[in-house]
Image (tube, helix red, strand yellow):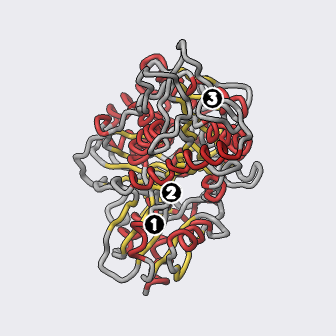
Amino acid sequence: MEDNIFTFIVGGKAGEGVKKAGEIAAHLFMEEGLQVFLMDDYMSLIRGGHNFTVVSTANREINSQYLNADVLVVSDKRSFENHKDHLSSKGILIYNSEEIEFISGIPIPFSSMVKEYKVKGLIYGVGAVASLAASISYDKPKLLQLIEDEYPSGKEDNLKFAGEIYDMVNEKLDKPFSLPSGNKKGSFLTGNQAISLGAIAAGLDSYYAYPMTPASSILHYLASLAPDFGISVVHPESEIAVINMAIGSAFAGARSMVGTSGGGFALMTEGFSLAGMAESPILVILSMRCGPATGVPTYTEQADLNFAISAGHGDFLRIVASPTSIQQAFYLSAEMLDLVWKYQSPGILLTDKHLSESAMSVDLDPNKCAWAESKLFDGEGEYKRYLDTEDGISPLLFPPSKQLIKWNSYEHDELGITTENPEKIVLMHEKRYKKDENLIEYLKRKQTLEVIRGDIPWNIFTYGSTYMSVKEALKYGNINPTIVAPIYLSPLPVWELKEFRRDNNLVIEQSISGQFSKLLKEKAGLQIRKTIKKYDGRPFDPITLSNKIKEVIS
């Protein structure tokens, strides 16, 4: 085990229950009082291919997966070839002896054993959980209870198969692993689940989405929670319908949110501009994956940054923020829903596949979330939807009403009536721009950066999920520079970043063109000494990243 970290990797074909096995392993570790980080890696296939799940656990906060397996379970030759170098020096390899020639490890005839059971699809995953349990001397009755709770379909087959595998591994095992002791209890959430719950805590009313990996699970998760929280969750026919329906819901007073990835958001940008002109409070969850076009749809990247901060045509306020952890994703989604309603402007919560779909131990307090509210019309006099105010924020009024409520995609006057009058065009431009200036003053009183101060003269700049990888790499390598991660990317908090302008600054990001580095140079005037980039669709491994950081700052 590295630094008292234990890692379990399970690999196999799509449809064999690999992902489910990883989830159950994570819950097993959490029941033992440990903290967990889980990462799923899967191809864009329903059947076949190669999928694997990494579950790393420790008795301290853990922010990243470790590809250094203490227990590795593989069902086929392809999985073995992909992961044989990931087995730690004292690791336990458990493999399907009918698909992989004899090697050092524990051979299990998974294929022929599975044929004896009616339930064949996910039963390999049951065997992987049982293999893990035997490898760590997990109590067999507790294992069987876990299997019964987590696999309600085909219960008898699953229990019998798990017991057989457990006994077989236990018999062939030289020495089981001992897990680190822990006493931590908390929740276990993916980033998308945290985003969903944060939005609910801020008063979410409506969610619209056309499924697109890696944002799709928000749609499914919110649909499962809709009856409990009174949320309207809708799957329209296209992304264009998604953004327009959300704007229509906001017109009626519903706190609306949409979710997508790069290709889907590309279709939404005209509607996003409409929200800018109509001053519609819409929150977009943009979960980045590899692009352009279809790209590598089930893998991660941070190359939509430029797209997000400049999305849509024309000048209007775009609020863009990116969570640096799954826990922060909960609070930031609530804060962003509040901000788009406070400033009656569209906003983007920018995340990525790694943060959206990975899961970790978190502690959340819904009472710390902002409740999304807006300035409302007091009923005095004629209602002007776009009233020019000191801060640029006009009072809202919702139907039904005897007053005229007019939202407009054309340039308009204060009533919302279309205009081409130059003086009124200038008035509305300047009215909307006041919100930009007001937002900056507001954010100066809020936390806009994640900063961990170090004791060596280097700063590491990063954002989004890469912040988690950097934190874990520094912990692993016992390196102590300052870490700086902007939470807000538009407006970028240059008022806080100016102190770092002349320092030794290292940027770590997942973009071949260095979009984040360029943003820091252009907007904040930072001198960037070096940029570490990764753009193969996979998140940083903390051990590899730690060594790269040492090369730069030594």
Q: Would you call the spot at circle 2 few (<14 residues within 10 Å), some (14-19), or many (20 or more)?
A: some
- Asked if disc 2 and disc 1 are in contact, CB closer than 8 Å, the reply is yes
From the viewer's perspective, is residue 386 above or below residue 347?
Answer: above
Instruction: Identify residue for label 3.
Output: 407
Q: Could you say whether the residue bearing mark 3 is in a helix, strand or loop?
A: loop
- Say which amino acid is labelled 2: Pro
Instruction: Identify residue for label 2.
Output: 491
Q: Nearer the viewer, residue 298 or 245?
A: 245
- Say which amino acid is labelled 3: Trp
Report how far apart the C-alphas of labels 2 and 1 lie in the structure. Answer: 8 Å
Report how far apart the C-alphas of labels 3 and 1 lie in the structure. Answer: 33 Å
The quarter of the displayed image where residue 377 is located: top left
Q: Nearer the viewer, residue 178 or 523?
A: 523
Report how far apart the C-alphas of labels 3 and 2 lie in the structure. Answer: 25 Å
- Which quadrant does the C terminus fall into? bottom left
Q: Could you say whether the residue bearing mark 1 is in a helix, strand or loop?
A: helix
Q: Is residue 506 left or right of residue 80?
A: left
- Which quadrant does the N terminus fall into? bottom left
**Residue at horizontal 56 percent and vertical 27 percent from the top:** 250
Among the two numbered marks 3 and 1 on one chain, the one whose residue lies closer to the N terminus:
3
